[in-house]
Amino acid sequence: MLALSHIAKSYTIEGRTIPVLRDVNLELPAGARMSLIGKSGAGKSTLISLIATIERPDAGTLRIGGEDTAAMNDRKLSRFRNAMVGIVFQFHHLLPEFTALENVAMPLLIGRRVSEAFSEARAMLGRVGLADRLEHKPAELSGGEQQRVSIARALIMRPKVLLLDEPTGNLDEETGLIILDLVLSLADEHKLTTLFVTHNKSFARRMERNYELKDGMLWPL
């Protein structure tokens, strides 16, 4: 489902080239669950952005579902990303002026009838335990509830790959564990290939595959 071969990525800052990833190789089959740890600045978020196709690598090959993402132009890549990849960040990135229901329905509104989009969003919010919070805006929700909305939004397009970039980083341990259990349950239910970035080693051990990003490369643990 997910295959990275010799991925490299650098950034140029004030005339200096700073290598972040230099030779990343990874293969994850459909339904696999992987944790990724690493020190701050190791490049974990950069790697997530590349797998999410938000950024493109400087070198190497990224295949998702057998498709070579480098062969796609920006428009095709955007459609492919929306269909194949769901992302949950540490910060929920919900639109503050819209309700939980509207935030989750938004990705569906292109190409779907409004009634259908809202029906599916309502069902997904019920699945994450927020059936009674549909009309609440993000500021009216707790941190854990905001992340539940983010998870619902990430899954509403029925992706094949779920990327989680420190989704429990701003939550207390108990709430973080509840969110992790929810994510794992949904990942199993939808047979998602899941990559979970975390600093919490006890959370990381819940995954069947564990890697550390160090010196621009992935190392199995």
Image (tube, grey):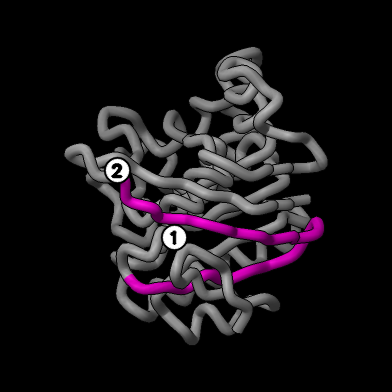
Nearer-the-camera pick, 73 or 97? 73
Q: Where is residue 128, by image quadrant?
A: bottom right
Q: Where does residue 80 sit, x and y in percent of width and height?
A: 67, 28
Q: Taking 124 as reference, is 198 left or right?
A: left
Nearer-the-camera pick, 10 or 160? 10
Looking at the image, is 98 positioned above or below residue 199? above
- Identify the residue at horizontal 44%, vertical 57% (top origin): 165
Q: Which residue is denoted by mark 1 in the rendering?
A: 44
Q: Where does residue 186 sit, x and y in percent of width and height?
A: 66, 59
Instruction: Specify whether residue 114 is in view.
Output: no
* Magenta stretch holds residue 38: yes
- Identify the residue at horizontal 47%, vertical 63% (top origin): 216
Q: How far apart are marks 2 and 1 (CA)?
A: 27 Å
* Amino acid type assigned to the residue bearing label 2 in the image: Pro
* Amino acid type assigned to the residue bearing label 1 in the image: Lys
Q: Where is residue 69, by image quadrant?
A: top right
Instruction: Specify whether residue 42 is in view.
Output: yes
Q: Which residue is denoted by mark 2 in the rendering?
A: 138
Q: Taking 91 as reference, is 47 left or right?
A: right
Q: Which mark is residue 11?
A: none
Q: What element carries label 2?
A: helix
Tell me if mark 1 has few (under 14), some (14-19) or many (20+) residues whose alpha carbon lies within 10 angstroms of its own: many
Q: Where does residue 22 sit, x and y in percent of width and height?
A: 51, 56
